[in-house]
Image: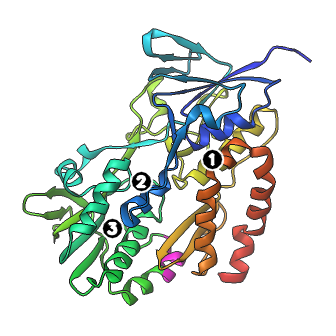
Amino acid sequence: MSGIKKRVVIVGGGTGGAVLANRLPKDEFEVTIVDRQPYNYFWPWLLYIAFRGSKKTIKREIRSVLKPWINFIQSEVKVVNLQERYVEINGGRRLSYDYLVVATGATVDYSKIPGLDKTTEMFGNYHSTEENAWKVWHTLNNMKEGTLAIILSPGAYRCPPSPLEGVFLAEEFFRKRGLRDRVKIVFATFYPRPYPAEPVNELIEPLLKERGIDYITFYTLDHIDPEKRIAYSMEGEELKFDAAVVIPPHVGVDIKYVPEDVLDSDRFVLADKFTNRIKGFDDAFVIGDASALPVAKTGVTAHLQAGVVARILQGEDARNTGRTNCPFDVGYGLGTFVISDFYNPAVKYPINRINHLFKVAFAATYWDMIMYPELWDPLFEAYFEATEPAKLRQLYG
């Protein structure tokens, strides 16, 4: 057996990148993670900053969640050259690799919606930064009456349930403060139904009606006039608001790729959905939110894809199933999960308190699960086997 280690460069130290790095055996791989900032974030908790005022920390230093033998370089990545097999970072330094994994996540692009930058400055959002999530919290606390609009911009975005999670938590916020009869909540979406997957929508739409939440479908946000406080759709509708929280369009991180045709029009990386191999390359992969794959942009997706890539790099014939497992908080301590895969549509999974507790428990153990996959993977595997979509469909349809 050769003593030469295979060089793996991972661009991005978020969920997918860190999970993958910690799974690769140190005697077989020399692993380097590059990230432009020093922190690993638990992004789902922005929801609870925005609507609960949670002060729980949502970040840790990337170095602290990596095995000690993994190299970490804090630097901006300038170029990913897939043809010549190197990553160029600040100062023109080039990192050569045997295998590359792109795990940069996604970023928001306010320029796609005129007026969105000013609207976000005024009211915040919960899909970008801690600062913007706190702005939402202050928006809610300063609102005593009027219309709160939560609008889903067209295009890709993190965490499919998150727009409606915000809607439900906003409703709970105002009801508990005795303001529900004075604050109208409107959810606007470009989808034909409140939640795009019909089995899940069969749970969610009646709940919206039960709680008196208005919703507008086929609403494709075009531009916003933050001074007049009107959001305009491509269909010609005008949505008047006193405060608006807009889920912004997400795009791929601005890095130069060679060749450029591995990117789609929104700079997401094209790849094979079963292996995560970047289009046209056997030695390069993309995982998590950075990919153009038709799967949910969530931490669980990144986690599962990281496991597949780790096995492929170790010589196994591993393939993605397309599994989604998105926790869905509907307020008042209740929740469900959006569970599906490439072969089974989303399951009509019951709303109950246990599901909400699962979401909270996952948040509490997030960094441990990244750092110690050898301990947590058996539990994950047992959970995912017990909740396979094909099995759940026999119970819940």
Counting residues from the start of the chain, the first of labels 1 and 3 encountered is: 3
As drawn, which residue projects farthest toward the front?
55
Q: Position of residue 33 (x, y in %)?
A: 59, 27
Which three-letter amino acid code belongs to the residue tagged 2? Tyr
Identity, as a three-letter code, of the amino acid under mark 3: Thr
Q: Which residue position is annotated with label 2?
A: 157
Vertical placement of 325 versus 215: above or below? above
Residue plotted at (68% across, 19% down): 98
Q: Identify the secondary structure beneath mark 1.
A: helix
The magenta segment is 197-203
Q: Quadrant of the C terminus?
A: bottom right
Nearer-N-terminus badge (2/3): 2
Disc 1 versus disc 2: distance between alpha carbons? 23 Å
Q: From the viewer's side, name the closer residue of 178 and 261.
A: 178
Q: Secondary structure at mark 3?
A: loop
Quickly name the residue at label 1: 367
Rendered-image quadrant of the N terminus:
top right
- Left or right of 142 on screen, residue 39: right
Q: Amino acid at mark 1?
A: Trp
